[in-house]
């Protein structure tokens, strides 16, 4: 009684301590409390999980997992030029993969994949026990959990809270996505070594094949190294890689994916060497840089988009032509072409443009973009020299001046804009009264300077820019002689405008860019053509430029190619640059040389002479030789093999010719030069070289000389139809005499094509006149 009275008033918590019991027993909970507590905690836990599950939403895929490699191809759409990527990945549809690819991965990574709900309780428990015991950390993750981790989280989860969230997300994914979708995204997401993400990039990196072509053995090897691809790469640890391969094949047999007989037939696959991944190495680095610039500048892609959007980019670069440009440039620089290597700081460029649409079909901008990132063809600038004379010629033809107009060609000649004794021709050679065809053929400076003064230098500048020159052109009397600097690509583009009969197209290098994932078009490079010159004007200018090749400053090297070619040599003051730019109806090619100082300071110096018999490098020497060697290979390509004829000479403005011009300064007239053209003779020399010309050209030559033509036709087995077999009489004849032209009326085989000296190794001839 006294004990009970003493306990009255003492406080208890949840009925403890129990005063009816003694010792430790008064603190032990009853089974009812234990059961109730466990049930309460269980219900709370279940509720918490249910709430967490309900609040779990499937996020948008991580940007990293969506990034794909952009692949750049040559014009054939199949030969890879290079890739752009922050990671090497190309997403593929799982439906395009052989079944054994997915089976190998499932057997290796998650054998219950097709039955589980996205998680494996046994696997997670096993991993937890292992981790608590201090073993190597394990995740116990299913394929769905790995997929959730990489595809949505974008990073590896290591803490237990993160793993719990990952498990809930995996269950959620298992309820909302079918197994094939999960497996496909997993295969496109995971890192598989050698810098690759996803099965397609890995297939290329390890075996050089597409994922759709993986064999059972190859698929088993890739599946086996998934847990540690960098360490188990066969090039790093071949024994471990083969152990893992065997394991995967054994599991595939156990799970019924392959038969024992199939298993016995497998041989460990051979992998290819590891790629160095130098995207911009070598000459093709300049092309890839141009592709990136065009996508960025014209298609408005950012660099990040280019590296991650997964584009398939087909360029305009034709592999056979590009190979020819690279090998020809190498032959120049190593001394094979000239018998002696040029100065190491010589910059040589080759660029070809398709006149039909402006496509850049070949471009050599340097030997290696990584060591010399300055592109000589697109960024390099050199004075155009006499390659600008055709611009003045076109301007004159547009201003009513015909090819037949004659000018005095003596040297030196006092002219506005040149100090006395005046402008000189190359070698100070003097000519009599000559027409614009001969002035073009022989690149007569004094005639073209008079012509430029007559039409106004601003006309020459305007024509150059309409043709395709993008750099500023000086407006002075000397601009006809190429005093302004130009890019080699611009010169190829401008002469392509002539080849296209006056249509200009903006040059481009990306034919089409499409998204790999759905083949939708992202960008197309070709633009609309614009008629900037009349076809008749261009036909006459082209005719004059063909004479440069047949008998003028480009004839020594380019003439032996023996097909219709028009072009112009060019050499700047003090031989600081040298050019040959030529074209056929199918292709326009510019070859340009310049030499920056060896010490790296700005500017250009006189090109150091090199090669047999060459005392100064002019457009008629090694630029013409390099053009010929390269184009000889181009003409062996089927697309460029036909020897297409140019349109016939149109003889625009023929009736407006006068014998002697009166040069005028710009913008006001100037006095006639002190020297005047010699008086016209009473007798006229029948033009030489009529045999072999087209009928229209021969007739025009006779009319220009003050004679008439009497044409007859006869069959010929040696002269092509439409060309002159013979002309009679010859020599000096009275003005107005009718000269009989015998023209072939039947087809005949073209004459044999001699091999240019540039490719046979013959000694170089005496230096021909430059442009």
Image: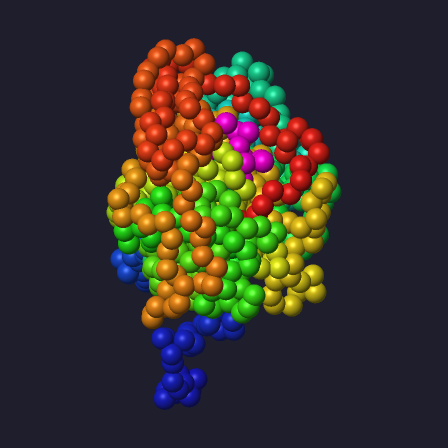
Q: Identify which residue, 740 or 435, lies in the foreground.
A: 740
Model colouring: rainbow
| Residue 133 visible in the current orientation | no
562 falls in the magenta region: yes
At a point 37% along the width and 56% down the height, the residue shown is: 661
Q: Main secondary structure of the magenta part?
A: loop
Quarter assignment of residue 224: top right
Q: Identify which residue, 594 or 310, lies in the foreground.
A: 594
> Up-down: is 456 above or below 263?
below
Q: Quadrant of the N terminus?
A: bottom left
Give the residue at the far front of this rendering: 682
At a point 51% along the width and 44% down the height, the residue shown is: 442
> Up-down: is 586 above or below 669?
above
| Residue 49 located left or right of residue 607 | left
> Up-down: is 622 above or below 631?
below
| Percent coordinates x, y for residue 473 in the rendering | 42, 63
At a point 51% along the width and 60% down the height, the residue shown is: 413
Range covered by the magenta-colored residues: 554-565
Q: Identify which residue, 503 or 398, lies in the foreground.
A: 398
| Percent coordinates x, y for residue 767 in the rendering | 64, 43
> Up-down: is 294 above or below 614?
below
| Percent coordinates x, y for residue 59 in the rendering | 32, 56
671 falls in the magenta region: no
């Amino acid at each position: 009684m006294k004990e009970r009275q003493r306990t009255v008033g003492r406080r208890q918590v949840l009925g403890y301590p129990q005063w009816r019991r003694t010792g430790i027993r008064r603190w032990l909970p009853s089974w009812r409390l234990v059961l109730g507590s466990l049930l309460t905690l269980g219900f709370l836990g279940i509720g918490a999980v249910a709430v967490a599950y309900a609040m779990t939403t499937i996020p948008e895929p991580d940007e990293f997992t969506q990034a794909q490699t952009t692949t750049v191809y040559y014009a054939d759409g199949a030969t890879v030029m290079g890739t752009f990527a922050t990671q090497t990945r190309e997403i593929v549809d799982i439906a395009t993969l052989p079944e054994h690819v997915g089976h190998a991965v499932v057997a290796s990574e998650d054998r219950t994949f097709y039955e589980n709900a996205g998680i494996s309780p046994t696997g997670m428990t096993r991993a937890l026990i292992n981790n608590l015991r201090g073993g190597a950390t394990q995740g116990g993750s299913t394929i769905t959990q790995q997929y959730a981790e990489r595809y949505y989280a974008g990073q590896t989860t290591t803490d237990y809270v993160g793993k719990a969230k990952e498990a809930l997300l995996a269950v959620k994914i298992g309820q909302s996505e079918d197994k094939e979708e999960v497996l496909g995204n997993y295969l496109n997401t995971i890192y598989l070594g050698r810098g690759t993400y996803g099965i397609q990039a890995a297939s290329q990196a390890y075996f050089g094949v597409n994922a759709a072509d993986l064999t059972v053995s190859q698929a088993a090897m890739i599946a086996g190294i998934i847990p540690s691809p960098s360490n188990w790469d066969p090039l790093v640890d071949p024994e471990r890689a083969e152990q893992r391969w065997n394991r995967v094949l054994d599991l595939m047999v156990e799970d019924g994916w392959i038969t024992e007989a199939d298993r016995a037939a497998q041989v460990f696959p051979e992998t290819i060497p590891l790629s160095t991944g130098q995207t911009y190495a070598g000459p093709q680095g300049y092309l890839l840089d141009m592709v990136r610039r065009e996508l960025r500048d014209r298609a408005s892609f950012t660099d990040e988009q280019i590296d991650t959007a997964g584009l398939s980019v087909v360029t305009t670069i034709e592999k056979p032509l590009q190979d020819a440009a690279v090998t020809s440039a190498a032959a120049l620089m190593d001394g094979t072409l000239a018998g002696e290597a040029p100065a190491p700081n010589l910059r040589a460029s080759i660029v070809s443009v398709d006149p039909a649409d402006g496509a850049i079909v070949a471009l050599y901008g340097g030997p290696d973009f990584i060591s010399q990132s300055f592109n000589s063809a697109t960024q390099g600038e050199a004075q155009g020299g006499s390659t600008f004379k055709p611009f003045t010629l076109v301007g004159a033809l547009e201003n009513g001046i015909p090819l037949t107009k004659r000018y005095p060609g003596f040297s030196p000649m006092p002219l506005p804009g040149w100090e006395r004794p005046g402008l000189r021709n190359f070698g100070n050679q003097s000519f009599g009264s000559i027409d614009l065809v001969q002035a073009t053929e022989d690149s007569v400076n004094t005639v073209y300077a008079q012509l430029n003064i007559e039409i106004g230098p601003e006309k020459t500048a305007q024509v150059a820019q309409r043709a395709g020159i993008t750099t500023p052109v000086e407006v002075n009397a000397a601009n006809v002689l190429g005093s302004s600097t130009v890019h080699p690509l611009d010169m190829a583009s401008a002469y392509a405008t002539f080849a296209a009969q006056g249509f200009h197209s903006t040059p481009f290098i990306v034919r089409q860019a499409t998204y790999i994932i759905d083949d939708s078009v992202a960008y197309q490079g070709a633009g609309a053509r614009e008629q900037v010159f009349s076809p008749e004007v261009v036909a006459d200018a082209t005719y004059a430029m063909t004479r440069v090749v047949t008998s003028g400053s480009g004839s020594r090297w380019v003439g032996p190619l023996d097909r219709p070619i028009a072009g112009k040599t060019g050499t700047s003051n003090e031989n600081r640059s040298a050019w040959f730019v030529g074209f056929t109806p199918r292709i326009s090619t510019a070859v340009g040389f310049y030499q920056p100082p060896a010490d790296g300071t700005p500017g250009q110096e006189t090109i150091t002479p090199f090669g047999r018999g060459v005392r100064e490098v002019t457009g008629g020497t090694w630029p013409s030789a390099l053009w010929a060697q390269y184009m000889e290979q181009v003409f062996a390509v089927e697309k460029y093999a036909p020897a297409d004829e140019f349109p016939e000479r149109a003889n625009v403005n023929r009736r407006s010719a006068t014998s002697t011009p009166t040069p005028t300064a710009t913008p006001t007239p100037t006095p006639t030069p002190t020297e005047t053209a010699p008086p016209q003779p009473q007798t006229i020399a029948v033009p030489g070289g009529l045999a072999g010309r087209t009928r229209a050209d021969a007739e025009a030559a006779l009319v220009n000389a003050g004679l008439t033509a009497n044409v007859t036709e006869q069959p010929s087995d040696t002269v092509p139809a439409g060309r002159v077999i013979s002309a009679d009489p010859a020599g000096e004849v009275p003005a107005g005499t009718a000269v009989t032209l015998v023209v072939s009326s039947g087809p005949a085989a073209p004459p044999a094509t001699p091999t240019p000296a540039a490719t046979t190794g013959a000694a170089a001839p005496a230096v021909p006149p430059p442009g």
